[in-house]
Image (cartoon, rainbow, N blue to C red):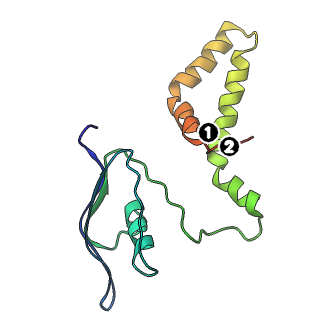
Amino acid sequence: MAGEYAFVMKDLRKVIPPKREILRGIWLSFFHGAKIGVLGANGAGKSTLLRIMAGVDRDFLGEAFPASGLRIGYLPQEPQLDASKDVRGNVEEGVAEVRALLTRFEEVSAKLGEPIETEEMDKLLKYLLANPDVKVEIQGYTNGNNRIKA
């Protein structure tokens, strides 16, 4: 990863027909772990730039690409929420997949702490070994301030 950019933009241009140019000649390159800020007046194209970086908006000229294997998350300014649910219900829906992983991981971990037959222990260990992404996904969502409470 040394020397590899986390994200690159080359001569990026975004035009809204018929001829409103929102972004023009944008060149960006930054390393993994870099902290970036996007500043500008209202209507300057900040949100458009971030949507392009997240891969949500693909209608542009030039190049914009993340490093191979880099995962980018994007939270829109005005997310589509289920009006029939309260805030907690909408958040729960958003973290349901990770919560299911966390619940399964906790179930398996608890079982491994109990006296169980060798056959059952082998089965649980095989599950953990066959699903290493479970631990990685859970760590990604539960470190620092991103805690998910069951």
Q: Which residue is mark 2?
A: 148
Q: Residue at x 61, y 39 (%)?
A: 142
Q: Residues within 10 Å of mark 2 (few under 14, many from 20)?
A: some
Q: CA distance from mark 2 to mark 1?
A: 6 Å
Q: Residues within 10 Å of mark 1 (few under 14, many from 20)?
A: some
Q: Nearer the viewer, residue 117 or 45?
A: 45
Q: Nearer the viewer, residue 13 or 94?
A: 13
Locate the C terminus by quadrant.
Answer: top right
Residue 11: x %, y % from top left: 22, 69
Amino acid type at image mark 2: Ile
Do the numbered discs 2 and 1 sit on residues whose CB atoms are within 8 Å? Answer: yes
Instruction: Return the residue found at the far bottom.
Output: 18
Q: Decide: is 13 above or below 127.
A: below
Relative horizontal placement of residue 70, taking residue 1 as reference (left or right): right
Q: Decide: is 101 above or below 28.
A: above
Residue 43: x %, y % from top left: 43, 82
Residue 93: mark in rendering: none
Residue 141: x %, y % from top left: 58, 42
